[in-house]
Image: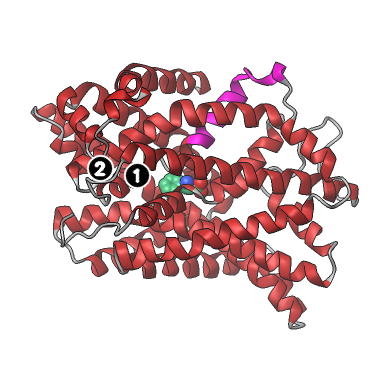
């Protein structure tokens, strides 16, 4: 590990950081919302299949690119290239991922800001500041600007400190808190009236819906977003892992954590919806569709917490703090992509690069907030529905078709002497070459 660039100091440090990147609003907000709008358990089933069969192999491709290159996405991809056109292609893919990360962060910071304001609201209520509490949960320009800026400054603060002192230390602190809080909330929710009906909707799939095109596309997008693919983030995190570590099992562990937390979040939110419904909150329209898709967590959960009386204030505080934490460990990874590029390719000092890039992305967020109706969805769609799958597909093409096979195999072997006897060794190189790009392309074209 190069002394000057830093790296994760331990296995657990990497797992927490990569899982921290993967686990975010996508798991705790996106996944349950998508599940509720796409037929419940059928979506869960398809998501699980796609996450393990397509997202995990693509995730491994990005980690391996980074660990081989020991550098930011562009440099790493260029190290695998031999011809001039390949180096140019490497630049497009690597830089494309970096731009994608910056775009995602620009809208993600706004959503994370909402989580923060919802976390503070119960505190304001507790102190008797009811007007402030109301302001915190009403959509307003000032509130959105203030909390987006606050969240971005926190992100900048952590990334300025570097890999070990910043990313690793904070992910190790924040991730276990998140898991514990989630489990406590689930235990509480399943004891309430209506929760069983919710569990049934969540766990009992209607197989006739499994092949619906909309459902497939949403599940694929969700799986790629959740593993932070196509954004250069996993390439750079891969580059901070020591060559002694067994990347294949680390990648599998991170995928398992990511998928499990999405599953746990569903176990909380879907039953909570039905509990809220049993308490008289309108959740579904007459035709069975969801009334409030993306604002689900902001309507269902607060009404659930209200129903708990005074305890609900603390639970509400806990839940939205949890969301903020999850968002923060993801947003730091998004900022690390562009920052590592600026530091390594343009020799800019880390703290300077972080501040400039962070403020630049914040400026973009401000533009989005000022045009929120029109720009929020647009930026989200461009970066997550188009950017991520395309870049992730190009990464697997890179690994399968441009990287020399022998050097790819040698990289897989690092840290895992007996890998030749595993299924991964036998299947994955072929899989990433043919199946990943084709399957991603098919689902993607289907969505057009
Ligand atoms: N995976 C994160 C989530 O689920 C979002 C993310 C996307 C993080 C892209 C980094 C890069 O919320």
Rendered residue at 70%/35% (across/down): 37
Q: Is residue 214 magenta?
A: yes
Q: Which circle's residue, 2 or 1, is located before the other in the chain?
A: 2
| 50 w.r.t. 299: above or below | above
| 440 w.r.t. 302: above or below | above
Camera-side residue of 220 and 322: 322
Left or right for 66, reference 196: left
Q: Which mark is residue 234?
A: 1
Camera-side residue of 130 and 212: 212
Question: Could you say whether the residue bearing mark 1 is in a helix, strand or loop?
Answer: helix
Q: Position of residue 144 (x, y in %)?
A: 57, 64
Q: Which residues are magenta?
A: 207-223
Rendered residue at 40%/61% (across/down): 363
Mark 2 closeness class: few <14, some 14–19, many ≥20 residues within 10 Å: many
Instruction: Quadrant for the N terminus, please.
Output: bottom left
Q: Is residue 114 visible?
A: no
Question: Real-space Cα distance between discs 2 and 1?
Answer: 7 Å
Q: Position of residue 111 (x, y in %)?
A: 56, 56
């Amino acid at each position: 590990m190069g002394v000057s660039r830093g790296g994760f100091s331990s296995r657990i440090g990497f797992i927490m950081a990569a899982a921290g990147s993967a686990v975010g609003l996508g798991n705790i907000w996106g996944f349950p919302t998508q599940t509720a709008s796409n037929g419940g358990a059928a979506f869960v089933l398809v998501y699980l299949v796609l996450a393990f069969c397509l997202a995990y192999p693509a995730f491994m491709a990005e980690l391996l690119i980074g660990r081989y290159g020991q550098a930011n996405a562009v440099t790493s991809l260029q190290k695998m290239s031999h011809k001039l056109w390949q180096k140019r292609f490497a630049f497009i893919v690597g830089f494309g991922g970096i731009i994608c990360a910056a775009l995602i962060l620009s809208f993600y910071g706004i959503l994370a800001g909402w989580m923060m304001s919802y976390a503070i609201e119960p505190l304001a209520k507790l102190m008797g500041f009811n007007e402030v509490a109301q302001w915190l949960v009403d959509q307003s320009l000032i509130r959105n600007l203030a909390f987006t800026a606050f969240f971005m400054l926190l992100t900048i603060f952590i990334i300025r400190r570097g890999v070990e002192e910043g990313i690793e230390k904070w992910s190790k602190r924040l991730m276990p808190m998140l898991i514990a809080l989630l489990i406590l909330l689930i235990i509480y929710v399943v004891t309430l009236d209506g929760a069983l009906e919710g569990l049934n909707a969540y766990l009992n799939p209607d197989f006739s819906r499994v092949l619906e095109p909309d459902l497939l596309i949403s599940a694929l997008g969700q799986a790629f977003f959740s593993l932070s693919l196509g954004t250069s983030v996993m390439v750079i995190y891969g580059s901070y892992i020591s060559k002694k570590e067994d990347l294949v099992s680390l990648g599998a562990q991170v995928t398992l954590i990511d998928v499990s937390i999405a599953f746990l979040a569903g176990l909380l939110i879907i039953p909570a919806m039905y509990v809220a419904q049993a308490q008289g909150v309108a959740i579904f329209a007459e035709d069975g569709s969801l009334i409030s898709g993306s604002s689900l967590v902001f309507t269902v959960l607060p009404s659930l917490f209200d129903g708990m009386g005074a305890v609900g204030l603390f639970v509400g505080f806990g839940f939205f703090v949890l969301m903020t934490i999850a968002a923060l460990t993801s947003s730091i990874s998004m900022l690390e992509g562009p920052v590592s590029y600026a530091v390594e390719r343009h020799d800019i000092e880390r703290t300077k690069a972080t501040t400039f890039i962070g403020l630049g992305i914040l400026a973009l967020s401000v533009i989005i907030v000022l045009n929120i109706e029109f720009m929020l969805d647009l930026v989200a769609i461009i970066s997550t529905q188009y950017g991520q799958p395309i870049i992730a597909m190009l990464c697997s093409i890179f690994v399968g078709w441009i990287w020399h096979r022998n050097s790819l195999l040698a990289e897989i072997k690092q840290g895992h002497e007996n890998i030749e006897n595993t299924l991964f060794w036998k299947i994955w190189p072929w899989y990433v070459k043919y199946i990943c790009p084709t399957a991603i392309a098919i689902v993607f074209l289907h969505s057009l």
